Image (cartoon, helix red, strand yellow):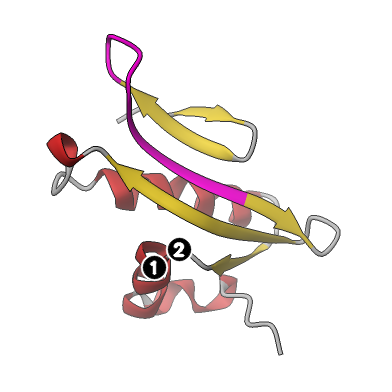
Amino acid sequence: MEFEKGPNRYFKNDDAGKLIGEVTFEQINDDSVIVIEHTFVNPAYRHQGMAAQLVQKVIDQARAENKLINPVCSYAKSMFIKTPELKDLWYKHN
């Protein structure tokens, strides 16, 4: 599935321009950390893997830019907890 990138978000609209899914984030600590704030998928499109694909876009961006991720969003946080391969990206503020 293809997603568009906007300022601090990846998203997908339907053919009518209605939002069907997005992940929002901000960059902190001199842009060295990406905070995933929110993941949304329209109920009609849930259970198709779209939320995971949206979070993966942020993960890919973080890896490409050598940044860490603070998954504040509950969906993203559960994805990080369940996926040991993401441990190297997980920013844990002490």
Mark 1 residue type: Ser
Task: Indicate the quadrant containing the N terminus: top left, top right, bottom left or bottom right.
Answer: top left
- Is residue 29 magenta-colored? no
- Is residue 21 magenta-colored? yes
Q: Label 2 to label 1, Cα distance in Å?
A: 4 Å
The mark found on residue 74 in the picture is 1
Is label 2 in contact with label 1 (beta carbons under 8 Å)?
yes
- Residue at which label 2 appears: 73
Please provide percent x and percent y for residue 17.
Answer: 35, 13
Please provide percent x and percent y for residue 92.
Answer: 63, 82
Mark 2 residue type: Cys
**Residue 43 placement: quadrant:** top left
Quick one: label 2, few (<14), some, or many (20+) residues within 10 Å? some
Quick one: label 1, few (<14), some, or many (20+) residues within 10 Å? few
Q: Which residues are magenta?
A: 14-25
Please provide percent x and percent y for residue 39.
Answer: 40, 50
